[in-house]
Image (cartoon, grey):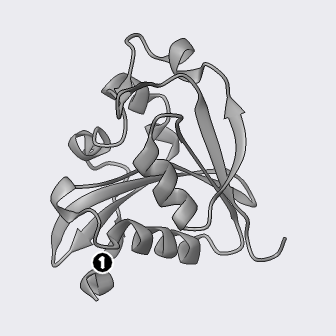
Amino acid sequence: MRNSGIILSKIPKHSPIPFELLLLADENVKSIDKYIFDCVIYAVIDNEKTIGVCAIQETNNDTIEIKNLAILVKHRNCGIGSRCIQMIEEKYALKNVFVATGDGSVDALRFYKRNGFKEYAVNKEYFLRNYDNPIVENGILLKDQIVLKKTNHCD
């Protein structure tokens, strides 16, 4: 299995923030700055090379949110993102996991649903209110934010 050697390595707080990777999953540094300083950031490493990033925010004792999960394009569609989800669940055992994405983010929605997430809420016109410039994905103007949830094993 190609992704069996994948590890998540916590990036120390004093280290530079890997914006070039975070920008693969978020629109701009300004939007990343709104959450990144409240997150634990993990490098996604394969054969000693960083191929992605994952930012996790603990919102309370039983809930985390995946604020950013990005894998370099040439490493996508190999199960690496799914393996990252599994490792996050192992690291944050018994916690509910939330993630939010755009209503036009077809690939992200499919990915999270395939990994056991269910639609939980819709933040109407989120992207229109929170971003200075329109964001278009897959030919779709992002308007609403879709929140997905994966429930812990105790519920």
**Number of marks present in the image shown:** 1
What residue appears at the point 30 percent right and 78 percent down from the top-left corner?
A: 6
Q: Is residue 7 left or right of residue 120?
A: left
What residue appears at the point 65 percent right and 75 percent down from the top-left corner?
A: 93
Q: Is residue 117 left or right of residue 17?
A: right
Q: Position of residue 5 (x, y in %)?
A: 27, 84
Q: Amino acid at mark 1?
A: Ile
Residue beneath disc 1 = 6
Q: Position of residue 69 (x, y in %)?
A: 40, 53
Task: State the residue in front, 134 or 110.
Answer: 110
What residue appears at the point 25 percent right and 70 percent down from the top-left corner?
A: 45
State whether residue 106 is above or below residue 12.
above
Quadrant containing the N terminus in the rendered view: bottom left
Asked whether residue 68 is in view, the answer is: no
Q: Position of residue 89 (x, y in %)?
A: 57, 72
Task: State the residue in front, 79 or 9.
Answer: 79
Q: Residues within 10 Å of mark 1 (few under 14, many from 20)?
A: many
Quadrant containing the C terminus in the rendered view: bottom right
Q: Residue furthest front?
A: 139
Query: SS at mark 1?
Result: loop
